[in-house]
Image: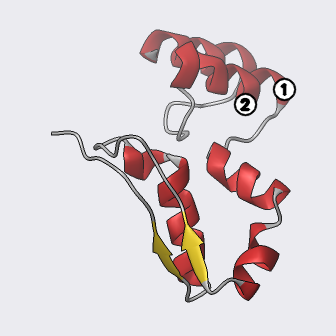
Amino acid sequence: MAHYSRQLTQTLGYDVSEAPGAGAAGGMGAALIAYAGGTLRPGIDLVLELLNADRHLSDAALTIVGEGWLDRQSAFGKAPVGVAGKAARHGRTGCGPLRRTR
């Protein structure tokens, strides 16, 4: 990935070495930034926006969300963490079933 990043910087002038998510999916994020002028953001943010979650959560008394497993990657984009964070910003309580890995 470091070599790819240097090549993009040298040929296109885009330094993606520090861009969060640029290395995901084999460097697809870096390619989208460099070749298409794209921007990257967590998928859960897009999903919550498309679902108009702010409107729904502003009226909710309780937010219920589930996940099969929570692990150390959960904080980096799993849906329940994103939904719980959004609910908390609206002052809403959340709950749901889950299991935790070691």
Q: Amino acid at mark 1?
A: Ala
Indicate whether 66 appears above or below 25.
below
To which residue does mark 1 refer? 36
Q: Secondary structure at mark 1?
A: helix
Query: On the picture, is 15 further left or further right than 58?
Result: left
Work out whether residue 81 can be spotted: yes
Q: Which numbered marker is on residue 33?
A: 2
**Whole-Å distance between the Cαs marked 2 and 1?**
6 Å
Q: Position of residue 73 (x, y in %)?
A: 36, 41
Query: On the picture, is 46 further left or further right than 2?
Result: right
Q: Amino acid at mark 2?
A: Ile
Quadrant assignment for the C terminus: top left
Q: Secondary structure at mark 2?
A: helix
Indicate whether 69 appears above or below 95.
above
Residue at screen point 74% across, 50% down: 47
Q: Position of residue 84 (x, y in %)?
A: 51, 67
